[in-house]
Amino acid sequence: MKELITITKIMFVEKRDIIISIFCGFIAGTTAIGLFALSGYLISKSALVPPIYTLMILVASVKMLGIISALSRYGERYFSHRGTFTMLSHLRVSFYERLEPLAPSIFQRYRSGDLLSRIVGDVETLQNFFLRVFYPPIVLMFVFLSTIFFTAFFSIEVTLIILVGFILTTFIFPAIIAFKQRKVERRVRESRGELSTEISEFLFGFRDLKIYQKLEIKESRLRHSADVYLKEQEHESVHNLLSESANTFLSLVVSVTVLAFGAYLVATEQLDGIFLAMLVMVSLTAFENTTSMSVFPSYLEDSRQAATRLNNVVRTEQEYETPKKSKEKLSITKSPYIRVNEVSFAFPDETRDTLSDISFTLPPGSKTAVVGPSGSGKSTLMQLLLQMYPVNQGEIYINNQSLNSLSQESIWKNTNVVLQKNHFFYGTIRQNLMFAKNGLTDEEMKNILEKVKLSHFTLNDQVLEKGENLSGGEKQRLAIARVLLKKAPIWLLDEPTSSIDALTEKYIYNYLFKEAKEDTVVLISHRLTGLESMDQIIVMESGRIVEVGTFDELMEKKGYFYEMKQIEQSVF
Amino acid sequence: MIGLKDMAKKQKEKLILLVFFAILSGTSTIGQNYLFVTIVNRIFLKNDSFFEIIPLLFGLLAVLFARTFFHYLSGRIGIRMASKVKRDLRNSLLHKFSTNPVQTSIQGQSGQKVSVMMDVVDEVDSYFSNYIPQLFQASIIPIMILFVIFTEHVATGVIILITAPFIPIFMMVIGFKTKDKTEEQLDKMSAFSGKFLDTLQGLTTLKLFGQSVEQKEAIRKGSLGFREATMDVLKVAFQNSLALEFISMLSIGLVALEVALRMIVFQDLSFYTGFLMLVLAPEFYTKLRDLGSAFHTGRGSMGAFKRLEYELASSVQPVEWGEGCLNSTTPPTIELCRVEFSYGEDDTFSLKNINVLIRPFEQVAIVGKTGSGKTTLLHVIAGLVPLSKGEVLLNESPRKLYSEKAWFDGISYISQDPYLFSGTIAENIAVGGNTSATREDIMEAAQKAGISRLVESLRNGYDTPIGEAGRGLSGGERQRIAIARAFLKNPSIILFDEPTTGLDLQTERILQSSMKELSKKSTVITVAHRLHTIKNADMILFMDNGEIIASGTHNELLKSNETYRNMVSVQQGGL
């Protein structure tokens, strides 16, 4: 429940809509009850043939109550939805605020890409928290309190019955359902996960399954999982239906009891018969609202889980974070001297070192290539240089300042980074280039597009989500264009041209190295070509540096690099 | 292709039950109101004693129970219908995918298919579990109520008959129009949360460029702007339901006025009938409004069903197989005669006029540019895709005469990206064996594939879980698992898709030596990306644009084919 309190706090940033929706809901609820009460009274009164003006007043009051009820229902709907959207906006912002300091390490920890879509989904789920969990019970309670207040004028017994009925249908019964619900839902979730795995294996592993003749076994297992899932789903639906029906019946029983007691009171002349119809109408209408309480547990459970997951993401992250000391800012105007000294690194939760005993220096203005097979730790090395993770063994120095004492932001500000996977935002080419630096002109951007051979795009061309409409090579060139515009003195490039053809690659590198003439450049390369002019090449394998030297030195040495080069030359 | 309605019609007996239960629940609704009015009437006007109405009270309780019970039963039928439909849909999808999903997995749509089988099928649920039962209840019960009203008091019936049509008309004229708009807006809402996702995914990039604070403001503004737009649409929708409420209220008011006037002024209507009218009229309008909202419930399912229809529509041709046996010790002669193949009618790529003869124990290398059809040819040889034309002969008789089992028992396929099933390493290697392999066999195969050292370094060794739920393996490690599978299986034909990129030295060496070892006992057909593979091949198939443009040994092709010569020399130049 603690998680939901956090959500409630965020929700209460904007109180106005909440209060208005509760107020309108209350008015709508009470006037509806009043409307039916009055019509019950009206018909009873008519039976006694009253003077016509009494009737006129009653009819007019019924009409007025009806109009007020409908209008406030409208107001309730309007403000509760408005409040929901406002709350959603607060939730997004607040979650973004908490997530922002944790990027990018959070993306490494959760390898699966659907962490983020789960976050978005959970935020979306929480919109029901206000609409279905938070305010309806409050409205319901107020409506019942005033109903009880009203009926107390006529009969204490009837009032007690309504009160007990209210407690039963609103609190006790939903609580019982909620208890069972958790188990039912967990079983559905589990069987769903199982089926999803089976289907994924079936489709993704189809070729291997077919060739190894395991397809039929897999198919029957899939069918079995599908049936189990279906059964659990059916079980859940029936459970929900049963709870809803049972709650409806329970509330009807309460009204019958009201009728029976009322009838008894009238028969024993403790109550004027003219109020009997009215009291029963009140009870029937008041309990109509409680049927929605049977779905309350499932919304509550959904919201609770969503809130817990969201909080967990942020909380576990914070545990990993280094204690926040006041960090110095890296301020450099020209390329610095970088020294990596006996650095070893293991990812949190992993026992094996990803990097062991890494030492090298990057003199100002030097050009360094890092090569090695995939999984050798090249990208991790770059992440350490960017302080995406704190170095826990050994030390990295920039101009004799320890990297750990510098703030992330100031390092990034001075670095041009191209990652293996670069993100592009939904929008235009211009929007995706603009944020490289403040105050960029269209002219500058157009010029850069030409330099990376993307002049077939205009600045207004659309970029879809994640750059879906761009080819791999186009995305890489756009990412390079972005850092070319940024113009910082340190360059860290992680396989920036892996999808670009050799000729274009050469052209772009020529321009890039001309631009970066004075700067310190680290290029992680998947290809061993075009490294002849680098000042040094660092060769890595399974987290260690195996060789360091210039291209010619390494080729002469006939070691690891030489052999890799031989293989590369024989690969078509 | 049949629609959702037809799928519902197929379960006729359930529909009949739904009608039956709707009638029963309508009867109990009416009975409830009768009893209720009777009790009040007797106590209030007839001055009956409490004991006289006790049976009526129990009757009322029974009727109320019946009403909820029948409602529950019809809901259950809906759930059962939904289950059956979902089961049928999943089975036909499974059938469809299992007949030939190699094409789909080649086209990289497997992820999408998973979501079709899981979520899209689930979306059909509410049509059957909610919409249909609600539709039956909401269309049958009001008619029954109206009938009762007419038999009791014609004037009320006439008032209802005149006012009621306004509700559906109003819904049709305005309601549907805005409903579309509302849905459009809801779509936009999901698009907007897509944008939120976009921002979260790009957080690293934003931070690297120092732009993350600006984005916070953008999220806030965007959300609020979106709120205003949505509220405009929702306002219209809410106004509509307000208007509907006014209409039904006005009608009920008219009924009440007429009843009251008849009771007081003309005094020709009893309290009993008047009260009955006053309780039945709201029931009628509530049900009528339910009918309107029922339409809304079914709409989401319609869209999902369209997706499924599309998925099930395209027909696939399965690969044909027969009954024949194959001698498993010596590899068969494989001959492809005028083979043609294309992925689909609208796909421009195809294999054309492929004629190849592969003798037992031959080493064949398939060479060509990216997109020239090398892997497709390997799939054709593997018998994974149906041919559009031509024939594959094994030992001079058509392959379709042999049994599927006989063929697949004799081959191994080592792809660039072998799939790891969720299970232990041992289980993943054993998937290659035809019979239940012993732990020793598995360890031997792993050793030959050069992965035993890595496996033994793990805490749980061969019992380490891998695949979906377990430890991830690198590309090179996965290939070595696939090779271990091949060693365990001991096939007579090996199909090998060589890695396009350079791997670590160890894996490269293992690949070379393992393939050499495996080739001693089998025919090996390789999509080649390594010069040594090509040089060692007995025959090279040089492909371009879906055709074999030349074949022969490396030296022969160097002499005879200029394109081949160029390709090799470009490669040697190191570009």
Image: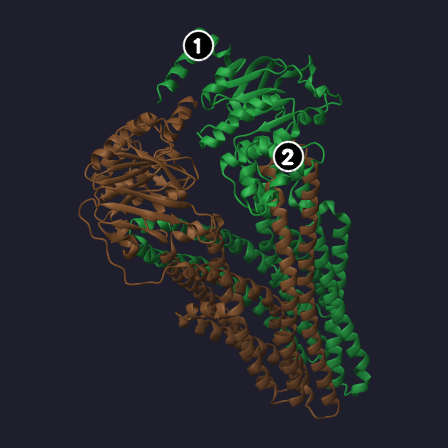
Chain colours: A brown, B green
Q: Quadrant of residue A53?
A: bottom right
Of B248 and B233, nearer the camera is: B233
| Callout 2 amino acid | Leu
| Left or right placement of residue B56 versus residue A426 in this view | right
Q: Quadrant of the C terminus of chain A?
A: top left
Residue A459 location in percent, x, y? 28, 39
> Which residue does the image show at 28% across and 54% down from the upper left?
A409
Cα–Cα span, label 1 and label 2: 39 Å
Q: What residue is pinned by disc 1?
A: B558
Q: State whether residue B543 appears in this view.
A: no
Residue A333 vs A555, above or below: the answer is below
Residue B369, x across and y down, in percent: 45, 21
Determine the chain carrying the residue at label 2.
A
Residue B308 to residue A56: above or below:
above
- Let me know if marks 1 and 2 both belong to one chain: no
Nearer the observer, A365 or B233: A365
**Amino acid type assigned to the residue bearing label 1 in the image:** Leu
Q: Secondary structure at mark 1?
A: helix
